Image (tube, helix red, strand yellow):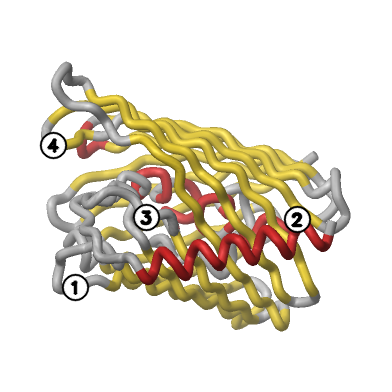
Amino acid sequence: MHMWVRFFILVVFGLSTQAFAQSGNISTTDLSRDFLNTGVALSMGGAYRALANSTQAILYNPAGIRQHKGRMLAGADYAYLKGYEGHQYGGSMIDTQTSREVAYGVSFHRSNPIIGGVGAKSSQLVLSVAHQAGRFFTGGSLKGYLINVDSATIEGPKGIDLDVGVLFRPSEMFSVAVVGYNLVRGSSIEEYPLQLAVAGAITIIPQATFTIDAVKNFNTSSQENVNLHLGGTISLNEQFAIRGGYAMDRVFGNDYYGVGLSVKADKAHINFAFGQTVEPRTEIYSINLEYLM
């Protein structure tokens, strides 16, 4: 199994090197962005890559799915995006029981964005694998996407893309992460733009963790191509935690903040999140349920 994991990681990094070398395409939108702005990550302003300790790790940093050892983790998501009155839903599962060495993840998400003033249906299926070597976690995600546009003359984009992530946790108090998104080169206009994220998380006291993520977009014509995300989580007790965060979106000029509440039981977690963009002002309401098996 070790041989296959190493082979997979070498292939992923080989493709990523090629992608960064051919990153001259432009991005007029980011169709994967709605899928990221939900759940715990939304409530932390998107600053989540160095934590990646829920089913959202499949989307944010696939290396994080290996942090759950010897168990199954299932998740369900729902979000209402008031900006275009769109409903978004999805389901995820992480498996660390089947193998001692490798974690597997799968997720499916569906949203209804507006593309060029036309309604659409966006679907995304993600398959992930992750491996741990000491304090290092490595992982990759293969994702397929399909966008159906409500127009007889416009054909929506479809394709396959790739994410790869590394998470280094030298202690329980500190972690850093590097994640490359959408490493497969697309058409001259990238619906899933090539991005590179660097992130960190620090736990000041056991009850409080602060996070920071910087994400560079390589396929944008905007003069500003780096977004900054700041977040934090505070555990009130064993059952309740509150979160907050702010995202400085310089690529699309769409800053937002997020807040959230988590309720924990023995095997189930419920995460409520609210996000609001600054200008134009619009809201996102999200609920996420996770169950440990």
Badge 3: residue crowd in 10 Å (few <14, some 14–19, many ≥20): many
Mark 3 is on which residue type?
Arg
Query: In this rendering, would 141 be left or right of 136?
Result: left
Quarter of the image with the C terminus in it: top right
| Residue at horizontal 56 percent and vertical 67 percent from the top | 13
What is the secondary structure assignment of the residue under circle 1?
A: loop
Vertical order, 11 against 210 (above or below): above
Q: Mark 1 vs mark 3: which is more N-terminal?
A: 3
Tell which circle, 3 or 4, labels the residue nearer the N-terminal end.
Answer: 4
Residue 185 shows which numbered tag? 3
Q: Give the x, y percent position of residue 281.
A: 16, 50
Q: Do the residues labelled 2 and 4 touch (CB within 8 Å)?
A: no
Q: In which quarter of the image is residue 47?
A: bottom left
Residue wearing tag 2: 68
How far apart marks 1 and 4 lie (CA) works out to 22 Å
Q: Which residue is drawn at 14% across and 21% down?
A: 153
Numbered tag placed on residue 116 in the rendering: 4
Q: Which of marks 1 and 2 is in front?
A: 1
